[in-house]
Amino acid sequence: MSVRVPESMLESYRALRPGLAVPSGTLVAAFHTDERTSNPGPVYVMERVGDAWKYSAFDAEGRATEHGALALCERCHAESPSGGLFGLPR
């Protein structure tokens, strides 16, 4: 998996620490790869809107498959230490 943020948001993403959150308007995308074949997999995008996140899912070809309050995304990201994000590996 490769996590990407726009260059203008990179500094705030890199500065994540437990208890901190990125500002509204931040975009984060997770690009997945099929581990067996190394082919591109789904892409998941989060957009911070106020104090909440909007989630979107895309297939490997870039077609939107889901959007909005996705329960699976919300449940996992609710456990993060930094306002919905897990941040860079330490």
Image (tube, grey):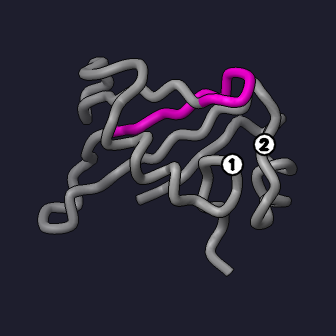
Judge left or right: residue 17 versus residue 79: right
Mark 2: few/some/many CA within 10 Å (<14, 14-19, 20+): many
Q: Amino acid at mark 1?
A: Gly
Residue 24 pos. (x, y %): 77, 27
In the displayed structure, 21 sits above or below 50; it is: below
Residue 7 pos. (x, y %): 78, 39
Mark count: 2
Residue 77 pos. (x, y %): 50, 50
Magenta span: predominant SS is strand
Q: Amino acid at mark 2?
A: Val
Instruction: Read off the magenta span.
Output: 43-52
In the displayed structure, 18 sits above or below 26; it is: below
Q: Quarter of the image holding residue 37?
A: bottom left
Instruction: Give the labeled residue for mark 1.
Output: 83
Frontmost residue, 12 versus 37: 12
User: Is residue 79 on the magenta stretch?
Assistant: no
Please name the residue shown 13% across and 67% down the image.
Answer: 36
Helix, strand or loop at label 2? It is loop
Judge left or right: residue 82 versus residue 12: left
Image quadrant containing the N terminus:
bottom left
Q: Quarter of the image holding residue 38?
A: bottom left
**Contact flag, marks 1 and 2 (Cβ < 8 Å):** yes
Instruction: Give the labeled residue for mark 2.
Output: 22
